[in-house]
Amino acid sequence: MSNTVLFELGVEELPARFIDDAIEQLTSKTEAWFKESRIPFGEIRSFATPRRLAVQISDVGDKQPDLEEEAKGPAKKIAIDENGDWTKAAIGFSKGQGKEIDDIYFKEIKGTEYVHVTKFVEGEPTEQLLQNFKKVFLSLNFPKNMRWASYELKYARPIRWMVALYGEQVIPFNIENVTTGRTTQGHRFLGDEADIQDASLYEEVLEGQSVIGSVERRKQMIHDQLTSLQEEKGWSLILDEDLLNEVNQLVEYPTAFSGSFNEEFLDIPEEALITSMKEHQRYFPVRSTKGELLPHFVGVRNGNAEHIDNVARGNEKVLKARLKDAQFFYEEDQKGTIDQKLSKLKRMVYQEELGTLADKVERVVAVSGKVAEWLELDENTRQQTKRAAEICKFDLVTQMVDEFTELQGVMGEKYARLFGEDDVVATAINEHYMPRQANGAVPSTTVGAIVSIADKLDTIVGSISIGIIPTGSQDPYGLRRQSLGILQTLKEKGWNISVEQLIDLVHHFYRELNLPTRTHEEVEEDLHEFFKVRAAYLLREDGIDPDVVEAVLSNGIGRYASTRDKAKVLVSKRTDESFKPVQEALGRVMKLAEKASQVEVDPALFENDSESKLYDMYQMTHPAYHEALKEEQPEEALTVLSSLASPIHDFFDHTMVMAEDEKVKNNRLSLLKGISEDVRVFADLTKIEWKQQF
Amino acid sequence: MNIQDMILTLQKHWSDQGCLLMQAYDTEKGAGTMSPMTLLRSLGPEPWNVAYVEPSRRPADGRYGENPNRLYQHHQFQVIMKPSPDNIQELYLDSLRALGIDPNKHDIRFVEDNWENPTLGAAGLGWEVWLDGMEITQFTYFQQIGGLEARPVSAEITYGLERLASYIQDKENVFDLEWTNGVTVGDIFTQPEYEHSVYTFEESDEEMLFQLFTTYEKEAQRIMDKGLVFPAYDYVLKCSHTFNLLDAKGVISVTERTGYISRVRNLARKIAKTYVEERERLEFPMLAKEDESHE
């Protein structure tokens, strides 16, 4: 006989952002628990609303399957005495296993016979086992837990009721003061409490109390309602998937409604309007089919269509107040000058140990200036860079950004234009926050890219200087994302600047701050390591094999774009059979040269032909190789190096490097050292594992 | 419904639920939470149920009485129930019904919002309650107060009275709200709003305020060492308000700011600890009272 099982956990409103993960956990942990408890079951369906998490399990068997277990007893010679009778040991064993002496049989294990019985273990009834299910509820992890009343339990929100049914039977257990039953709670306002007669009726009972239990069904309802509103009105809604999911987890019974706001508010920048609607009110903004923002919005009520006009009017009123604020901020922010706003940065903390935002900006200006100089930009662009760096944070003191933090940069660009700043400068203010998310677009303009890199470097170097180093999943200041942003920007721009140069430049400013506790050397080491790990990550993301990544980063990151190109060349070479002897030759040179200190090579000390041939070849390849690297042609550079392979093999065939004569030996090692140094500029080839792929 | 009737209604409602009706506390403060009726009484094991109106001063929000939404001083209706009752959400929703808000005609939601006041070493989890998209109430389960774990947990319900009234009375400007028949918020508060703003932003004597802060701080420290928790706490409140005035004036530098906040926090922590110790010395009288009433 089989039954349906239902477990429902009733809680006070869960944070919307907790629910998707919680129900996923509940489902997988339920499955694991049933398997571990050896209870036969069919399918698991899950349900979740802000006030409940539930699983319904179909075709649950009424008991565990019976088991036949073999139990091993004493050896035969102990079980049977010299007369051929059962000993006390044998009798005791069979009794202990709940069997008769006649049930005993022998089985040989590693040459010795032992007494055995087959034990029958009867499966336990499901109804009893289900009482232990409470541990599944208690095992759910939430991002934040709380206590309530006088209880010890910490949970996402207070638990208010539980339903646990095996078919029609209530499974008794309790968590703190809440005991299971068959009574569930309906919608807060449209429903009532209701008894569930049989576990299989859960979804219908909920629906009878105006609760749509299935997450997918609720989402589909919202989607359908939004689509039909869209069609009816000829609108095009901005259907953000994250917003849809969040809205879905804020309601038990959804009804979409639309509202309007005064057209005068459309003068406020669109980004501010959209943020206000989406982030603050969880509304879907509305565009015309041509893409213009319209003075309408769509919200989703937790309830039905009754009195929906009243709800819409209320929401309109709230939005109006918010937009009035935004309008006021927008007008106020345009008063005064940018310089007046900049002076307020002196009063805004950036990081307690790192001073104010004005201090940060000062460093960003200096770093940007230096980078512009390295890039040999024209005077005009340098001036634009300087200005952009100086005012890149001015919008942080505007009321609009104070209210809508996510609009930093966006408002900066808009206001900068209104204040008559240069186009390039205005764009750079917005772009210096890019990439805004992982794998987002990098700044398109040179000025934007410079300020972006300078700002991010300052944040990273500053944080690491005061010991804020991301560990595991902890990266509260987004340092990893920012360092990836720097590398990606450098890659796109292909500037002739190494990552190390940049780190040292910024660290130079921090050395003067004399920050507590950490030495410059520690900080430097951490910085280089931090960037190296990020570069390695990015290269692997680009499909570069780990050993090649290690090989190209052995000398540091250098110019990231070139390093990446070199890695790509090496990756393509590793499937090339003809490259194998090259890598062997160059790798062998590098290993031997490790012990050498380089002195001037003296051809007069050569004792055989292979030595002078290799030397001559090196004299030819050395300039050509560096020329190719300078020309950004890594493939060509590697080809030049490759021409050394054959003379190297020849050299090793005919020459004892470790000669007895110290002078001769050192001369040979120096030759190898020269070649090795060249190779090392490209990559540490000894790190590459030669795995031929055909 | 005018504000006066709202207050009467809420008082009646929470009084019926067993809350003591207290009056506003007579020292300046930024929020109802800072009244000793909440901050101190929510500490320790003794039961405590209370409701009161608290005028709350936020000097930096002063707008010379010209902004329709922002005030130097607004009013909160504050409820504390310790330990938090199982049906606290229902009790709250009933209070809205009492105010004439029929949930079936509106959209009421509990939207996650966690509250933290580092100055008081206090933190809690809960929601902001939305009425048709407007935040009308802050609903918090205290987890920590004055750096001490809240045991048992109090439920704190804070209604923003002007907010709620603007909805109930359908008014856009806070100064147009009716306090009672024929008298508006504007009639009562326009002048003080204006004068307090002038004082806060233009006329306050910084030197005197700096001096006061130090004086209050010292006094709090001194009397706390004598175990006089309540008077000490009054001086902490004075410190806090003085700091807010200085901050609004823009005369506290960045580095100083953190310093001041941590000075207030240290005081608050010390007071929290001393309060619990003093109550323990008195054998937690409210606990004994509860036992009596159960007999």
Image: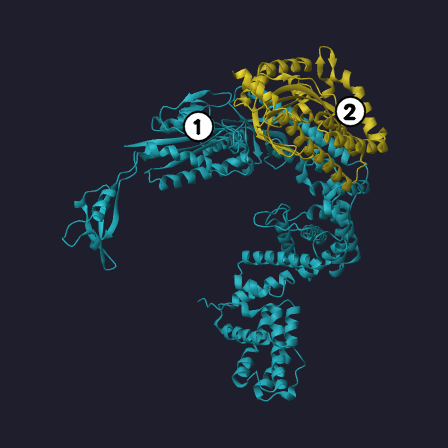
Chain colours: A cyan, B yellow
Q: Check chain identity for marks 2 and 1: say if they share one.
A: no
| Chain letter of the residue carrying label 1 | A
Which SS class for mark 2? loop
Please report the residue visible at 40 percent of the width from the left and 27 percent of the height from the top.
A202
Give A339 or A627, whichever is nearer the viewer.
A339
The correct choice, above or below, for B180 with respect to A3 in the image is: above
Residue that lies at the very extreme toward the top in this rendered image: B181
Residue B91 spot, x, y in % from top left = 56, 19
Residue under numbered circle 2: B66
Residue A463 spot, x, y in % from top left = 68, 50
State the separation of the CA atoms marked 2 and 1: 52 Å
Numbered circle sitting on residue A162: 1
The correct choice, above or below, for B289 with respect to A571 in the image is: above
Residue A69 spot, x, y in % from top left = 26, 45
Residue type at mark 1?
Met
- Disc nearest the viewer among 2 and 1: 1
**Badge 2 local density, few (<14 within 10 Å), some, or many (20+)?**
some
